């Protein structure tokens, strides 16, 4: 028996997997708030590839590869092929995790993490929402998590 997601969250995940436009969402996962846009697993893989590509392209070694942008892109693609193959092929289990693009991960203290794309297993989501959130500092809290909401 698999993990049963909240029906509305499952509908959002299904819409994202179909490639439909989805709103930003907020997830409470452990002590972290994750904010970002729900996207398909395919889009997660695309974002991941292009971020890897950017990282390699900005490296000192890449600048030595070739003066031709096209040739450099081809060589970077060859370099990344085995890395991307490690993720495997699409499977029915892809729908057991939310893919979040342009994610901000916030804890109670410390810096926010800015992540191009991440995946959150459905079973790890403690609660979620899609509307803006604010922190009520009048309650005497000395810290808190504040997240923005943008469309």
Image (cartoon, grey):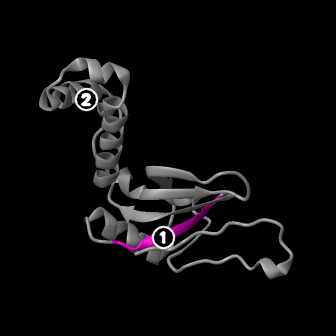
- Residue 123, given in percent of the width and then of the height, sits at 55, 58
Q: Earlier in the sequence, mark 2 or mark 1?
A: 1
- Residue 112, given in percent of the width and then of the height, sits at 60, 54
Prevailing SS of the magenta stretch: strand
Q: Which residue is mark 1?
A: 25
In space, the residues marked 2 and 1 are separated at their CA atoms by 31 Å
Between 134 and 34, the residue placed more toward the observer is 134
Which quadrant of the view contains residue 73?
A: top left
Please report the residue visible at 30 percent of the width from the left and 62 percent of the height from the top: 17
Please report the residue visible at 57 percent of the width from the left and 56 percent of the height from the top: 105
Q: Is residue 72 left or right of residue 118?
A: left
Secondary structure under badge 1?
Answer: strand
Up the image or down, 104 lies above or below 151; here it is above
Between 116 and 92, the residue placed more toward the observer is 116
Q: Which residue is mark 2?
A: 81
Identify the magenta region. 22-29
Up the image or down, 6 lies above or below 108; here it is below
Q: Is residue 78 left or right of residue 1?
A: left
Q: Which label was assigned to residue 109?
A: none
Q: Is residue 91 left or right of residue 141?
A: left
Secondary structure under badge 2?
Answer: helix
Up the image or down, 142 lies above or below 59; here it is below
Binning the other alpha carbons within 10 Å of mark 1 as few (below 14), some (14 to 19) or many (20 upward) gives many
Please report the residue visible at 50 percent of the width from the left and 55 percent of the height from the top: 120
- Residue 151, given in percent of the width and then of the height, sits at 40, 75
Which quadrant of the view contains residue 12?
A: bottom left
């Amino acid at each position: 028996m698999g993990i049963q997601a909240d029906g509305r969250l499952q509908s959002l995940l299904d819409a994202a997997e179909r490639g439909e436009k989805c709103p930003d969402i907020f997830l409470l996962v452990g002590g972290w708030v994750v904010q970002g846009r729900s996207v398909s697993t395919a889009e997660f893989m695309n974002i991941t590839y292009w971020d890897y590509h950017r990282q390699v392209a900005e490296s000192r070694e890449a600048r030595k590869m070739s003066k031709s942008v096209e040739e450099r892109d081809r060589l970077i693609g060859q370099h990344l092929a085995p890395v991307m193959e490690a993720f495997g092929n699409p499977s029915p289990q892809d729908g057991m995790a939310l893919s979040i693009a342009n994610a901000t991960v916030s804890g109670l203290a410390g810096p926010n993490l800015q992540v191009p794309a991440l995946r959150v297993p459905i079973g790890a989501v403690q609660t979620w929402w899609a509307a803006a959130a604010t922190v009520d500092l009048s309650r005497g809290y000395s810290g808190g998590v504040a997240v923005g909401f943008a469309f």
